[in-house]
Image (tube, grey):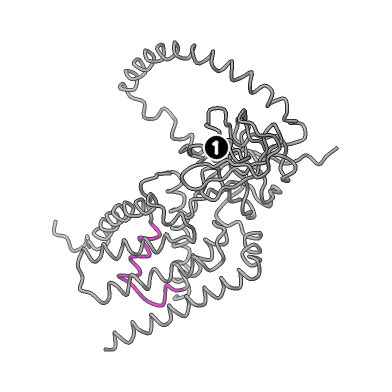
Amino acid sequence: MKNENLTVRNYIIYVIFVLFSFSIMVLDYFSNQEISSTISKRMNFLIPSNINFSDYIEFFDNDLFQTRNSLINENIRLKNEVLELRQLKIENDLLKDELDSNKNLIESVDSTNYFYIKTTPFIKNNESKFLVSGGYDQNFMKDDIVVNDEGFVIGFVDKIFQNHSEIIFLTDSDFSMPGLDRFGNEYLVQNNGSEILVYTTLVRELSSNIDFIFTDTRFDQPSRFPIVSLTDAKITTDDNKISSTLEINNTTFSFTDLYIVKINDLP
Amino acid sequence: MIYLKNLFNIFSFVFLLFIELLINTILDSNYFMILPFFIGMFVISTRRFSNFYISVFLIAGIYYDSLFSSNILGFSSAKFLITVVLMNFIIANQQENIFLDFATFTIGIFVYKFIYSLEYLNPQFLYQLLISSVVNYFLFRILNITIEKNVLKQKI
């Protein structure tokens, strides 16, 4: 009997603290997350900044565990490599054609207007969002675009903390970004959880000959960074609308090098 | 001494939460997750339930919300406390058996991983949670056996 009373009393106290947590939530929600922003701006507990995380991961690539078996495997691998080289020659010809089509794209990006801050995703939170190094300390802003080493936009900065930031990647179900094609048509690139939808919000010239969807200054973004390539995608043009769908590739971003694009304010 | 013990528990659970995030980032698996923080929470909830741990989960939740997510502050604290109470309520009102223990563990994981997004209802995510509950319950049992075994009482 005494034990039962104690358990009930414990439950009541737990429920009181659950209600206390809800009241913090209500306060934070109605203050436009001012309370959580204040804490995240001032605290950087457990996450040291300016660390090259990929250096730590390279530890696993060392020669510590090299054995005789690996040498035999290496021999087999080399044989396979010769076969692959033959295939690569064919691929090389195809890539030359692709290079020509990309030439126009590269020339249109004025790289001198921008500078790039290298960053690394080092934590994936419970909501499956990646946190990257660099935050208020590196002057990151909400909606700053994130590009990979090929120059393609792969996400944007969502929430900023003192020395780290949360990124929404193209593969996340809440990704949504406006873009432009070479004819000036405006698009929305959106992830619906199962595929990437690309559809027009404003049509100036109806055409199915679209190669890339770019970022543009009219959406407060750095100009002419490709978001998606539609060269191999099926494009539908009907009812004065252009749309297409793309598959979501299961790419892993953990500990890879990414770049935040910032506009160079200096003259 | 009580305050010191409380402070130690807070730091331990905060560190466990950080380790959990780090393990799952390195693992990056679409099939399961390793949840040491949740295992700790299950131990507290079903074996050592008391008011003493309220501050631990409250602070761990605030720590997570303010440093690792764009959640509204207090969301994770409420979620952690509800998970602990719910798991204890199921276990306390039934006789001890392994199936009930596992069922409670699975329900606990589903509440613990709740997010206010449609992605929560994604079949792949639910499948991942189910596999995770099997893997983590297995880890919990191994841990439980190891902790409960008193080496000093063993015959040589």
Q: How many marks?
A: 1
Point 51% across, 48% down: residue: A192
Q: What residue range appears in magenta?
A: B36-54
Give above or below for B133 relative to A138: below
What is the crowding at mark 1: few (fewer than 14 residues within 10 Å), some, or many (at least 20)? some
Along the viewing direction, whichever of B57 and A201 lies nearer the viewer:
A201
Point 58% across, 38% down: residue: A238
Q: Residue furthest bottom?
A: A1
Q: Quadrant of residue A239?
A: top right
Residue B154 falls left or right of residue A253: left
Q: Residue furthest front?
A: A239
Q: Quadrant of residue B144?
A: bottom left
Circle 1 is placed at which residue position? A244
Point 60% across, 32% down: residue: A149
Along the viewing direction, whichever of A99 and B24 lies nearer the viewer:
A99
Q: Residue furthest left?
A: B155
Q: Does the magenta portion include B43?
A: yes
- On the image, the x and y values in percent for residue A43 come to 62, 59
Q: Main secondary structure of the magenta part?
A: helix
Give above or below for B133 relative to A146: below
Q: Quadrant of residue B38?
A: bottom left
- On the image, the x and y values in percent for residue B57 come to 45, 68
- Quadrant where the N terminus of chain B sits is bottom left
- On the image, the x and y values in percent for residue A178 come to 65, 44
Q: Chain of mark 1?
A: A
Give above or below for A232 relative to B48: above
Along the viewing direction, whichever of A180 and A106 lies nearer the viewer:
A180
Q: Amino acid at mark 1?
A: Ser
Along the viewing direction, whichever of B22 and A205 lies nearer the viewer:
A205
Q: Does the magenta portion include A261?
A: no
The secondary element bearing badge 1 is classed as strand
Give above or below for B120 relative to B25: below
